Image (cartoon, rainbow, N blue to C red):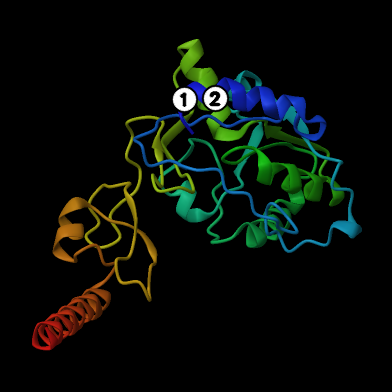
Amino acid sequence: MPEHFIDDFIAHLDSVAVLREIPLKWAVEDDGKSFLKLVIKVRPKIVADGLKDKVFDVTNVGTRLSPMEFHNLVQQDDVIVVDMRNSYESEVGHFESAICPEVRTFREEVELVVEQLQEQKDRKILLYCTGGVRCEKASAWMRHHGFLDVNQLHGGVIAYTHEIKKAGLPSQFIGKNFVFDDRLGERITEDVISHCHQCGKPCDTHVNCAYDPCHKLVIQCDECAEKYAGCCSNECYQEFTHSEVRGSVRQDEVETKAKVQN
């Protein structure tokens, strides 16, 4: 959206009763690769969690903490901080004291966290995610299972980063915040806490494998990106290279046939 239309867009949202004061998430950094157009999709749930909403009160959520409240609490020794994002997200950035479950989906995590913290139900639990959405469901699920003091970062890592920068305070979240657009991440601090999945070199750049049948999300350094042509493995590189050659041959055949016909 052109920047000079933003105020008009927000004013229009506020004119619609169900959208009034809807929380907006502003990118921490933008290199021109963030969402470039508004896309609205109808889904049964915002987050695929695998939970049956009728068996628990989804509105009985945890205490919503402001970024500054969360910042002060997350530094205390008597709290349990849980990253409610997938492992490929927390791998490149997380709060320093957080538990980061090794899961690939939110559906796995909500069950796993309840199971792993069964003996900690009377402790103060601090949950966080990218923008605060997943924590709404996770906190309600934990309260349903008897956790007494469940809290969540309102607005998620995005809101936290904006507030901390505004206050001039050192961020307790280190590394990158993974985002689900073409940027695949926005830098919060200069810490690089992950490694290239191919050579092990310090790196926190996510890429999707260039070989389309794979398209696996991996962390890849510049050197490996060049060596493997953006592919996640030597196997995919070989397939990708062969498919490129086959595509080039077919294109040459088409062009040759067109010349003969002309």
Query: Residue 22, located in which quarter of the rendered image?
Result: top right
Q: Is residue 46 above or below residue 258?
A: above
Contact between labelled residues 2 and 1, with CB atoms less than 8 Å apart: yes
Residue 120 in view of the camera: no
Task: Indicate which disc residue 35 carries.
Answer: none
Q: Position of residue 209 (x, y in %)?
A: 32, 65
Q: Circle 2 sits on which residue?
A: 6
Q: Residue at x 40, y 48 (%)?
A: 182
Q: Secondary structure at mark 1?
A: helix
Q: Residue furthest front?
A: 262
Q: Position of residue 191 (x, y in %)?
A: 33, 34
Q: Residue at x 49, y 48 (%)?
A: 180
Residue 41 in view of the camera: yes
Q: Nearer the viewer, residue 151 or 50?
A: 50
Q: Position of residue 241 (x, y in %)?
A: 18, 76
Residue 214 lies left or right of residue 40; in this view the side is: left
Residue 18 lies left or right of residue 71; in this view the side is: right
Q: Nearer the viewer, residue 125 or 251?
A: 251
Amino acid type at circle 2 is Ile
Q: Residue furthest top?
A: 167
How packed is label 1: few (under 14 Cα within 10 Å), some, or many (20 or more)? few
Q: Is residue 141 above or below residue 133?
A: below
Q: Position of residue 108 (x, y in %)?
A: 64, 62
Q: Nearer the viewer, residue 52 or 34?
A: 34
> Whole-Å distance between the Cαs marked 1 and 2?
5 Å
Q: Residue at x 21, y 80 (%)?
A: 247
Task: Indicate which disc residue 3 carries.
Answer: 1
